[in-house]
Amino acid sequence: MTKPDFDQIIDRVGTGCAKWDDMKTYYGVDPQDGISMWVADMDFRPPAIVQQAVDAQAAHGIYGYPGSNKPYLEAIRWWMQTRHGWQVQPDWVLTAAGLVNGTALAVDAFTQPGDRVILMTPVYHAFARVISANDREVAEFPLRLDENRVYQMDWDAWAGQMTGREKMLILCSPHNPGGRVWSPEELREVAHFCKQHDLILVSDEIHHDLIMPDAPRHSVTALAAPDITDRLITLTAATKTFNIAGAHIGNAIIPDPALRAAYQGRQMALGLSPGLFGQDMVTAAYSPEGAAWVDELVAYIDGNRRLFDEGINSIPGLHSMPLQATYLAWVDFSGTGMSREDFTARVQDQARIAANHGPTFGQGGEDFLRFNLATPRARVREAVQRMKQAFSDLQ
């Protein structure tokens, strides 16, 4: 494998990508002199083997209906076994048009209008969006910050929030935006809670390959809590790992036949099926060459993480939550004593950085901004310097 050049600056402005072309619309930050650190995709090209698969399909020049997906399913089986120790049977895998679609299908298949769906907030904002769009109620169960300012599950508090109308819990594992890797013991607590309250558990594990070198190993929920497979839908995808989110392809892995039939029934009713290029890209990515690329990627992101955290944590009143997984830094501004409007204006207007606003992630996000570190290191270094300048009066 040719060593990837993650330091290469690739100009994405004008390519139709949300991350750079929409940053001025949403944040008032001009891409000509700003730094885009909001949308969770990477400013890196995928491994060469993925591009080769796309080139081969394009060179053929006929884009008919896809046929057998056996190579695709075999690639998923190999990846899950090799990278996560999970023996997945091919017939467990149902392919969705990305994991937001996969989540929406689960909400549609296993809940009814008016039901409550639990989210441990702050959490990935698309969950609440699809719950509300399906006429279900978002039940926000806030995570607790411990003495080390790390998120913990708060079962005592959450038990008091149950009303009896809750039908599903959506877990983000690893956690986005906090970058937390949940332990096997914590996952078993989630499973126990779901069994106790008769909840379907949707475990979104899209960031499972992006674990920092010194962090605990990611635990597959299905392995940590094998007694819950009769109520478990695991969502996985290659898109976050290999920066191919535009392919809009992901998987719902459902061992239980009854759950799988219900989920598949909704897919069939809506006429959903995967596209040609996405399956080719994933089949190529889930390979030894793809695995070697991911190892290089994680090491690079870890370097960006260290650079960013050192700089941000040196600014009085700012705290970057310890990042165990993902490439998304979750920065707490509460120590500045500023209002959300004031610290956000400094980031956007003075530092000229587009970062996700914390309240979009639900309760507990009010004092935070989320910064995407999956960009060339020169940009991370520049972002840190701009942040120091924007908050220089605190130093």
Image: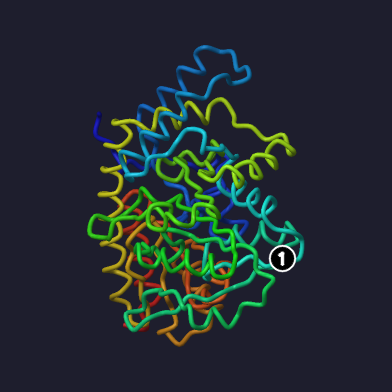
For the point 44% across and 74% down, the residue is: 153
Quarter location, residue 76:
top left
Quarter occupied by the C terminus: bottom left
For the point 70% across and 42% down, the residue is: 266
The image shows residue 111 at horizontal and vertical percentages of 69, 58
Left or right, residue 35 beside residue 164: left
Q: Does residue 36 sit above or below 66 in this rendering?
A: below
Left or right, residue 48 beside residue 234: left
Q: Does residue 360 sit above or below 233 in this rendering?
A: below
Pointer 1: what residue?
115
Figure label count = 1
Quarter location, residue 110:
bottom right
Q: Which of 276 and 15 is in front in this view?
A: 276
Quarter location, residue 323:
bottom left
Q: Does residue 194 sit above or below 334 in this rendering?
A: above
For the point 40% across and 34% down, the residue is: 77
The image shows residue 306 at horizontal and vertical percentages of 26, 62
Quarter occupied by the N terminus: top left
